[in-house]
Amino acid sequence: MSPVERSYLGVPINKPKVAFFEMSSCEGCQLQMLNNEASLLDFLSLVEVVNFREAMTEKGHDYQIAFVEGSITRSDEIDRLKKIRKQADTLVAIGSCACFGGVNQLKNRFELDWVKKEVYGDYPIDTRKVEPLSAHVTVDLEIYGCPIKKEEVERIVTNLVLGKSIEHPKYPICVECKENHNVCLYDLGEPCLGPVTRAGCDSWCPSNRLGCWGCRGPVDEANVTQLKEIMAQHNFTMEQMLDRMECFGGFSEYITEMKK
Amino acid sequence: MKLSCDINVRHLTRVEGHGNIHIKIQDGKVEKASWDVVETPRFFEAIVVGKHWENAPYICGRICGICSIGHTLASIRAIENAFGIIPDKQTSSLRLILKHMETLQSHLLHLYFLAAPDFLNVGSVFPLIESHPDVVQRAARMKLLANDACDIIGGRRMHPTRTVVGGFTMLPEKNQLLQLKSRLEAVVADLLATAELFQTFSFPDFVRETEFVSLKGDKHYPFIGGDLISTDGVIKAEEEYLAMTNEYMVDHSTSKWSRLSRPSFAVGALARVNNNFSLLHPVAQEIAGRFSLNAVNHNPYMLNIAQLLECVHVVLDSISMLDELLDTPWQAPRTPVEPKEGLGVSAVEVPRGILYHAYEFDASGRIVHANCVIPTSQNNANIHYDIIELAHQYTAQGKSDSEIQQLAEMLVRAYDPCISCSVH
């Protein structure tokens, strides 16, 4: 790691020891960290990485900030997570799986026995209902997205290191979409959860003409009733709306209300 | 004195996912050697049941963070095969360039960040930032190009946004492709420098005779669809994939295992090269000569070199496809989709080997049954048998426990396993 000392407004910056861990996931969010080619080296000079199994052999256990990806789907993960919680001053959940259960929680639509049989037949396999990290430990900070967006991670980590407060946007994706001068996806004939999803990704999918699937979870006071009307006006079915709202688990508390 | 040791590597580092190596040697005799996959299953094949076809590429693409583009394209192809959709030339070319760029970024990540540290005797790429800055900068520069290309064509380097059944939600601008082409031309020199770097590494001379399975190229080095072939002479059609994969469960692994003509087989860059050597770009074939890599090569450590050859191939192939696209006016980005009842199967070569997606649809286009067979799950049995043979050969050669451990770790890493993917 680079020994270059950093300072901010002349004040030396404390270089925290950070570690990366994963529960059940595609490990894509950690990979996003390595995908920052242009700013990776700069980013690495801000922190001291002591544990990152996907990238390094050395394993340090004296970290202050733990970034944890993935959801809880087996009992041994709870023990691992609790140990991480005990060590870390700050535990950051990264990505939809860690924050809400992610695509993994779609499994919870079914009986566990059926799920096991469908994939493994009669072979015994250990699994449990999918849960986000917060079901078992206190999570200090959540970084949303499937996958997480590197620019957002870098901004948040810089603020963490500088001791600045971290706030997520309180407005929906639609605001960013307008800023990006995108044609509304509804006008292009695509369903979109932009009106009810928390911003911060710079309307990543809608800017590529893919309607939002809500991976970042609900914006404060999400108006789902209004969304239902918009969907109906544009001839989208309740199934299409539900498919998106249940995909990552962020909207779970709204699903019951929606089905009314 | 004869070697006695108990090597236990729990959660091997610099690989994707969770696997353990266990080698027990008593008085120079190998008592136990195994590759155990302890990853948690996520049950993708069950969670898409009942879902409308549109959900499949979006959800199943998320099986893997490294090869999400490959999974998305495999899912799309399976659905298009089920519905009888044949993509036009423009869509096929853009998809293949997109896949090439994923192959490039994935292979480079493996070669420089995961494998190279072993050959340079460091624990990660991080110390190389200071000791070999030019090497790390070259790696970052090439990886950035590959990832930027995925952004331009797929909308996003990970979990792509523009790739849909029937084509793309939107197309790149021609000037973006023009810039991409000139950046690709510039990267050729970096790849030749990579070859020179890897020529300075010494590769273990371990050999175990292996059956290699991949797509069978016809006129082109194969990546998307076509017949399946093995070096033991088995040839099957794409939709007969189950006869090629033969999955079964073993006690010490949450990943399924596969076999064909022997107790195990290998997939991946070396399998593709072994089955399709003459279809590699001539420049890649010339580089193969520098490493004395001829088909069929049975040294798993040469997987690293096979990946290097493919990096060269995909860059040069992309340049010629871009030339053609730049000379042709854009057609509509996507065609309409009509669901049909039935089964759709796809075989796609992703960085770590051949990947199969299969879905059975009802008349409304909802998924009745899904199956995904992952490259690493096909490789897991082969890695296991390699480790047993490695333990025997290196114990007989009088290597120490730490040498055997390092060689075993390097062997598993050579397969570039994507373990969480293999359990999915």
Image (cartoon, rainbow, N blue to C red):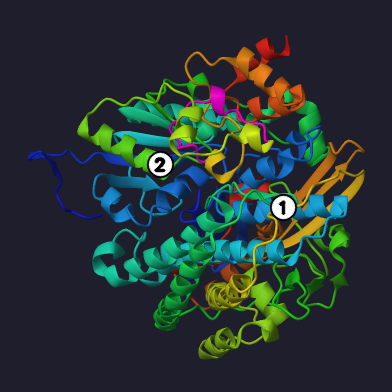
Picture coordinates of residue B203, whole percent (x, y): 48, 79
Residue annotated with mark 1:
B334
The answer as to whether the residues below labels 1 and 2 share one chain is: no
Distance Cα–Cα, label 1 vs label 2: 40 Å
Residue annotated with mark 2:
A20
Q: Nearer the viewer, residue B66 or A220?
A: A220
B341 in relation to B32, above or below: above
Quarter-of-image position of residue A254? top right
- Tell whether position A196 is magenta: yes
Q: Amino acid at mark 1?
A: Arg
Is A160 displayed left or right of B146 in the figure? left
Report in which chain the residue with disc 2 lies. A
Report in which chain the residue with disc 1 lies. B
Q: Nearer the viewer, residue A25 or B414?
A: A25
- Tell whether position A123 is magenta: no
B15 in relation to B216, above or below: above
Picture coordinates of residue A238, whole percent (x, y): 75, 22
B111 in relation to A93, above or below: below
Range of the magenta residues?
A: A190-205
Picture coordinates of residue A142, whole percent (x, y): 42, 28
Marking on residue B413: none
